[in-house]
Image: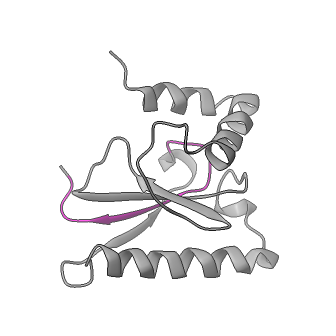
């Protein structure tokens, strides 16, 4: 059986469904099948539903942004929130000593058509 994440990923490639999915993630995340770690005014953080790394956290903006090219300089508050949240997660999960990566995919490398960041640690499975 197909993982629900794969179904949602396919739906997200259709513009109208992407908007609905992002709205749901932002406004109804307590109802979605995600394992939420934290939430701020501008982003939500949760464990990746199909992790590739031992620690694999997704950080998703609450604003609908397809990719990094849609982020504007006036949105510097979001970037500050993102980096403060990443720093907090690094401390919370004690990633400093073992190492970590903050990954941003775009274009053909981006599975889900919404700007998101991967905070990972460990070797890929």
Location of residue 2 with respect to 74 vertically, above or below: above
Residue bounds of the magenta highlight:
111-124
Residue 121 location, x and y as percent?
26, 67
Q: Quadrant of the N terminus?
A: top left
Q: Nearer the viewer, residue 21 or 15?
A: 21
Residue at 29%, 73% in the rendered image: 93
Q: Nearer the viewer, residue 46 or 98?
A: 46
Magenta stretch contains residue 122: yes
Residue at 78%, 71% in the rendered image: 72
| Left or right of residue 2, residue 21 in this image | right
Hey, which quadrant is residue 120 in on the image?
Answer: bottom left
Location of residue 100 with respect to 48 vertically, above or below: below
Hey, which quadrant is residue 44 in on the image?
Answer: bottom right
Magenta-colored segment: predominant secondary structure: loop
Residue at 55%, 27% in the rendered image: 10
Q: Nearer the viewer, residue 108 or 6?
A: 6
Residue 123 location, x and y as percent?
18, 61
Residue at 44%, 54% in the rendered image: 46
Location of residue 36 with respect to 102 vertically, above or below: above
Colour scheme in use:
one colour
Q: Nearer the viewer, residue 85 or 28?
A: 28
């Amino acid at each position: 059986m197909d993982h629900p994440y794969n179904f949602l990923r396919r739906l997200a490639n259709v513009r109208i469904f992407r908007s609905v999915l992002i709205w749901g993630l932002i406004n109804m995340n307590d109802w979605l099948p995600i394992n939420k770690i934290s939430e701020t005014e501008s982003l939500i953080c949760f464990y990746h539903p199909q992790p590739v790394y031992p620690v694999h956290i997704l950080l998703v903006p609450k604003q609908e942004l397809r990719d990094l090219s849609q982020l504007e300089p006036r949105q510097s508050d979001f970037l500050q929130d993102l980096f403060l949240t990443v720093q907090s997660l690094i401390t919370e999960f004690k990633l400093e000593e073992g190492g970590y990566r903050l990954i941003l995919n775009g274009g053909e490398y981006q599975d889900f058509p919404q700007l998101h960041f991967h905070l990972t640690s460990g070797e890929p499975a």
